[in-house]
Amino acid sequence: MSHAGPAAGPLDLDGLDLIVFDKDGTLIDFDAMWGGWAEGLADRLEATLGGPIRAELHRQIGYDTQARRTIPGSPLAATPMADLRVMTTDLVARSTGRSWTAADAAVDGAWSPPDPVGLARPLTDLVGLFSVLRAARRKVAIVTSDDRAPTVATLIALEIAGLVDALVCADDGLPSKPAPDTLLRACRTAGVEPIRTAMIGDSVADMTMAGAAGVGRRIAVLSGIGRRAELEPLCDVVIDSIALLLPG
Protein backbone atom coordinates (compact mmCIF):
# COMPACT_ATOMS: atom_id res chain seq x y z
CA MET A 1 0.00 0.00 0.00
CA SER A 2 1.34 3.42 -0.90
CA HIS A 3 0.76 6.65 0.96
CA ALA A 4 1.16 10.05 -0.64
CA GLY A 5 1.38 13.49 0.91
CA PRO A 6 1.33 17.01 -0.46
CA ALA A 7 4.91 16.82 -1.70
CA ALA A 8 4.27 13.79 -3.88
CA GLY A 9 2.87 15.78 -6.82
CA PRO A 10 -0.26 15.01 -8.85
CA LEU A 11 -1.79 11.64 -8.02
CA ASP A 12 -1.31 8.92 -10.65
CA LEU A 13 -4.66 8.06 -12.25
CA ASP A 14 -3.35 5.87 -15.08
CA GLY A 15 -5.80 3.19 -16.18
CA LEU A 16 -8.80 4.97 -14.67
CA ASP A 17 -11.65 6.32 -16.78
CA LEU A 18 -14.04 7.42 -14.03
CA ILE A 19 -13.26 9.38 -10.86
CA VAL A 20 -16.03 9.21 -8.26
CA PHE A 21 -16.07 11.71 -5.42
CA ASP A 22 -17.88 11.77 -2.11
CA LYS A 23 -19.27 15.26 -1.43
CA ASP A 24 -19.08 16.41 2.20
CA GLY A 25 -15.55 16.19 3.57
CA THR A 26 -14.11 15.47 0.13
CA LEU A 27 -15.32 18.23 -2.18
CA ILE A 28 -16.56 20.63 0.50
CA ASP A 29 -15.82 21.24 4.18
CA PHE A 30 -17.82 18.72 6.21
CA ASP A 31 -18.17 20.54 9.52
CA ALA A 32 -18.85 23.89 7.87
CA MET A 33 -21.95 22.20 6.44
CA TRP A 34 -22.98 19.85 9.24
CA GLY A 35 -21.54 21.27 12.45
CA GLY A 36 -23.75 24.32 12.33
CA TRP A 37 -26.68 22.11 11.42
CA ALA A 38 -26.18 19.92 14.51
CA GLU A 39 -25.96 23.00 16.73
CA GLY A 40 -28.99 24.62 15.14
CA LEU A 41 -31.11 21.49 15.39
CA ALA A 42 -30.35 21.27 19.11
CA ASP A 43 -31.31 24.93 19.57
CA ARG A 44 -34.61 24.50 17.76
CA LEU A 45 -35.49 21.23 19.49
CA GLU A 46 -34.84 22.68 22.94
CA ALA A 47 -37.03 25.67 22.11
CA THR A 48 -39.79 23.35 20.86
CA LEU A 49 -39.56 20.92 23.77
CA GLY A 50 -39.00 23.53 26.45
CA GLY A 51 -36.09 21.63 27.97
CA PRO A 52 -32.54 20.39 27.41
CA ILE A 53 -31.82 17.71 24.79
CA ARG A 54 -28.59 18.96 23.19
CA ALA A 55 -26.21 16.52 24.90
CA GLU A 56 -28.41 13.50 24.20
CA LEU A 57 -29.05 14.55 20.61
CA HIS A 58 -25.39 15.09 19.84
CA ARG A 59 -24.45 11.75 21.41
CA GLN A 60 -27.13 10.05 19.33
CA ILE A 61 -26.09 11.48 15.97
CA GLY A 62 -22.36 11.56 16.71
CA TYR A 63 -21.39 15.20 17.11
CA ASP A 64 -18.75 16.30 19.63
CA THR A 65 -20.33 19.36 21.22
CA GLN A 66 -17.12 20.49 22.94
CA ALA A 67 -14.79 20.07 19.95
CA ARG A 68 -17.53 21.13 17.52
CA ARG A 69 -16.64 18.25 15.21
CA THR A 70 -18.44 15.26 13.74
CA ILE A 71 -17.27 12.01 15.36
CA PRO A 72 -15.67 9.63 12.80
CA GLY A 73 -17.83 6.59 12.10
CA SER A 74 -20.91 8.18 13.67
CA PRO A 75 -24.37 8.43 12.08
CA LEU A 76 -23.80 12.09 11.21
CA ALA A 77 -20.75 11.06 9.20
CA ALA A 78 -22.60 9.02 6.58
CA THR A 79 -26.29 8.52 7.42
CA PRO A 80 -28.98 9.86 5.05
CA MET A 81 -31.13 12.71 6.34
CA ALA A 82 -34.26 10.57 6.44
CA ASP A 83 -32.57 8.13 8.81
CA LEU A 84 -31.17 10.92 10.96
CA ARG A 85 -34.67 12.26 11.34
CA VAL A 86 -36.00 8.87 12.46
CA MET A 87 -33.18 8.64 15.01
CA THR A 88 -34.01 12.10 16.30
CA THR A 89 -37.72 11.33 16.59
CA ASP A 90 -36.95 8.12 18.47
CA LEU A 91 -34.72 10.04 20.88
CA VAL A 92 -37.39 12.67 21.55
CA ALA A 93 -39.99 9.96 22.18
CA ARG A 94 -37.72 8.05 24.57
CA SER A 95 -36.30 11.03 26.44
CA THR A 96 -39.53 12.98 26.92
CA GLY A 97 -42.11 10.21 27.19
CA ARG A 98 -44.01 11.51 24.19
CA SER A 99 -45.82 9.22 21.80
CA TRP A 100 -44.15 8.66 18.43
CA THR A 101 -46.76 10.93 16.79
CA ALA A 102 -46.16 13.73 19.28
CA ALA A 103 -42.39 13.32 19.02
CA ASP A 104 -42.58 13.39 15.22
CA ALA A 105 -44.60 16.62 15.36
CA ALA A 106 -42.00 18.19 17.67
CA VAL A 107 -39.15 17.17 15.38
CA ASP A 108 -41.07 18.41 12.35
CA GLY A 109 -41.22 21.85 13.91
CA ALA A 110 -37.47 21.92 14.49
CA TRP A 111 -36.19 20.07 11.43
CA SER A 112 -34.44 22.05 8.74
CA PRO A 113 -31.71 20.87 6.35
CA PRO A 114 -28.43 22.80 6.17
CA ASP A 115 -28.14 25.60 3.63
CA PRO A 116 -26.66 23.77 0.63
CA VAL A 117 -25.37 26.99 -0.92
CA GLY A 118 -24.32 29.31 1.89
CA LEU A 119 -22.50 26.58 3.82
CA ALA A 120 -20.76 24.90 0.86
CA ARG A 121 -17.06 25.71 1.19
CA PRO A 122 -15.01 23.99 -1.54
CA LEU A 123 -11.77 22.33 -0.46
CA THR A 124 -9.97 23.18 -3.70
CA ASP A 125 -10.65 24.74 -7.12
CA LEU A 126 -13.39 22.30 -8.11
CA VAL A 127 -14.05 23.81 -11.53
CA GLY A 128 -10.36 23.57 -12.29
CA LEU A 129 -10.07 20.03 -10.97
CA PHE A 130 -13.09 18.64 -12.81
CA SER A 131 -12.03 20.44 -15.99
CA VAL A 132 -8.55 18.90 -15.79
CA LEU A 133 -10.01 15.42 -15.32
CA ARG A 134 -12.40 15.81 -18.25
CA ALA A 135 -9.66 17.25 -20.46
CA ALA A 136 -7.77 14.02 -19.77
CA ARG A 137 -10.84 12.11 -21.06
CA ARG A 138 -11.89 10.96 -17.62
CA LYS A 139 -15.48 11.06 -16.47
CA VAL A 140 -16.48 12.54 -13.12
CA ALA A 141 -19.18 11.32 -10.74
CA ILE A 142 -20.40 12.16 -7.25
CA VAL A 143 -21.86 9.63 -4.80
CA THR A 144 -23.18 11.20 -1.61
CA SER A 145 -25.18 10.38 1.51
CA ASP A 146 -26.97 13.71 1.10
CA ASP A 147 -30.29 14.06 -0.71
CA ARG A 148 -30.54 15.02 -4.38
CA ALA A 149 -32.20 18.45 -4.17
CA PRO A 150 -29.63 20.04 -1.82
CA THR A 151 -26.78 18.29 -3.62
CA VAL A 152 -27.85 19.69 -6.99
CA ALA A 153 -28.20 23.15 -5.42
CA THR A 154 -24.64 22.87 -4.10
CA LEU A 155 -23.21 21.74 -7.44
CA ILE A 156 -24.95 24.58 -9.28
CA ALA A 157 -23.69 27.14 -6.77
CA LEU A 158 -20.14 25.81 -7.11
CA GLU A 159 -20.50 25.90 -10.92
CA ILE A 160 -19.64 22.22 -11.37
CA ALA A 161 -23.07 20.75 -12.15
CA GLY A 162 -22.30 20.68 -15.86
CA LEU A 163 -18.99 18.91 -15.27
CA VAL A 164 -20.50 15.85 -13.55
CA ASP A 165 -21.31 12.77 -15.64
CA ALA A 166 -23.16 10.84 -12.92
CA LEU A 167 -24.74 11.81 -9.61
CA VAL A 168 -26.14 9.32 -7.09
CA CYS A 169 -27.74 10.53 -3.86
CA ALA A 170 -29.17 9.12 -0.64
CA ASP A 171 -32.82 9.46 -1.68
CA ASP A 172 -32.42 7.70 -5.03
CA GLY A 173 -33.94 4.51 -3.63
CA LEU A 174 -30.76 2.45 -3.24
CA PRO A 175 -29.09 0.98 -0.15
CA SER A 176 -26.83 3.66 1.29
CA LYS A 177 -23.11 3.59 2.04
CA PRO A 178 -21.26 1.40 2.94
CA ALA A 179 -23.31 -0.83 0.58
CA PRO A 180 -21.85 -0.73 -2.96
CA ASP A 181 -25.13 -0.02 -4.75
CA THR A 182 -24.82 3.76 -5.18
CA LEU A 183 -21.24 3.51 -6.43
CA LEU A 184 -22.15 0.75 -8.87
CA ARG A 185 -25.05 2.90 -10.13
CA ALA A 186 -22.59 5.73 -10.80
CA CYS A 187 -20.37 3.36 -12.79
CA ARG A 188 -23.32 2.12 -14.86
CA THR A 189 -24.56 5.65 -15.51
CA ALA A 190 -21.13 6.76 -16.65
CA GLY A 191 -20.64 3.60 -18.70
CA VAL A 192 -17.39 2.64 -16.98
CA GLU A 193 -16.48 -0.67 -15.38
CA PRO A 194 -15.73 -0.54 -11.64
CA ILE A 195 -12.19 -1.83 -12.21
CA ARG A 196 -11.46 1.32 -14.26
CA THR A 197 -12.96 3.56 -11.57
CA ALA A 198 -11.44 5.38 -8.59
CA MET A 199 -13.44 6.24 -5.49
CA ILE A 200 -12.27 9.25 -3.48
CA GLY A 201 -13.76 9.84 -0.04
CA ASP A 202 -13.05 10.84 3.54
CA SER A 203 -14.87 8.16 5.52
CA VAL A 204 -14.73 4.49 6.42
CA ALA A 205 -18.14 4.15 4.74
CA ASP A 206 -16.69 5.51 1.47
CA MET A 207 -13.75 3.13 1.46
CA THR A 208 -15.84 0.13 2.55
CA MET A 209 -18.28 0.88 -0.27
CA ALA A 210 -15.40 1.15 -2.74
CA GLY A 211 -13.99 -2.20 -1.67
CA ALA A 212 -17.38 -3.89 -1.94
CA ALA A 213 -17.89 -2.42 -5.43
CA GLY A 214 -14.51 -3.70 -6.63
CA VAL A 215 -13.23 -0.39 -7.94
CA GLY A 216 -9.74 -0.13 -9.38
CA ARG A 217 -8.47 2.38 -6.84
CA ARG A 218 -9.60 3.50 -3.39
CA ILE A 219 -8.29 6.94 -2.47
CA ALA A 220 -8.88 8.29 1.04
CA VAL A 221 -8.58 11.98 1.90
CA LEU A 222 -7.84 13.48 5.31
CA SER A 223 -9.83 16.66 4.64
CA GLY A 224 -13.03 15.36 6.27
CA ILE A 225 -14.02 13.22 9.22
CA GLY A 226 -11.87 10.12 8.66
CA ARG A 227 -8.52 9.61 10.38
CA ARG A 228 -5.46 8.02 8.80
CA ALA A 229 -5.34 5.05 11.17
CA GLU A 230 -8.87 3.93 10.32
CA LEU A 231 -8.68 4.70 6.60
CA GLU A 232 -5.31 3.15 5.73
CA PRO A 233 -6.39 -0.50 6.08
CA LEU A 234 -9.31 0.11 3.69
CA CYS A 235 -7.70 1.99 0.82
CA ASP A 236 -4.85 2.02 -1.68
CA VAL A 237 -3.56 5.50 -0.90
CA VAL A 238 -4.17 8.24 1.66
CA ILE A 239 -3.73 11.89 0.66
CA ASP A 240 -4.32 15.14 2.48
CA SER A 241 -6.96 16.43 0.07
CA ILE A 242 -8.20 16.37 -3.51
CA ALA A 243 -6.03 19.43 -4.17
CA LEU A 244 -3.28 16.89 -4.86
CA LEU A 245 -5.07 15.92 -8.07
CA LEU A 246 -4.48 19.37 -9.55
CA PRO A 247 -1.27 19.76 -11.54
CA GLY A 248 1.39 22.15 -10.30
Image (cartoon, grey):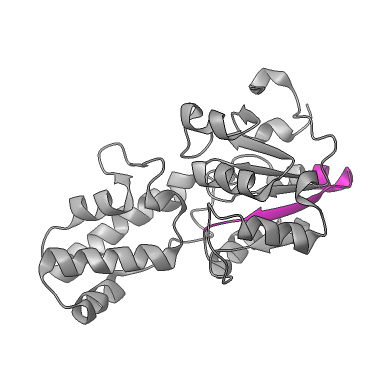
Q: Quadrant of the C terminus?
A: top right
Residue 142, magenta (yes or no): yes
Query: At 43% across and 45% down in the image, what residue appears?
Result: 31
Q: Quadrant of residue 133?
A: top right
Residue situated furthest top in the rendering: 7
Answer above or below: position of 17 versus 3: below
Query: At 69% across and 46% down in the image, what residue appears?
Result: 214
Where is residue 1? Give x, y as percent: 65, 23
Q: In which quarter of the image is residue 162?
A: bottom right
Where is residue 60? Give x, y as percent: 27, 53
In the picture provided, is 216 more to the left or to the right than 91?
right
Q: Nearer the viewer, residue 131 or 72?
A: 72
In the picture provided, is 208 more to the left or to the right than 165?
left
Q: Which of 80 and 114 is in front in this view?
A: 80
Q: What stretch is highlighted in magenta?
A: 131-145
Residue 225 makes an appearance in the image = yes
Where is residue 195? Give x, y as percent: 78, 45
Residue 215, magenta (yes or no): no
Residue 161 makes an appearance in the image = no
Answer above or below: position of 233 versus 139: above
Query: At 43% across and 64% down in the image, what residue appears?
Result: 81
- Report how many numbered discs are placed on residues in the image: 0
Query: At 61% across and 29% down in the image, what residue appears?
Result: 238
Where is residue 64? Give x, y as percent: 29, 42
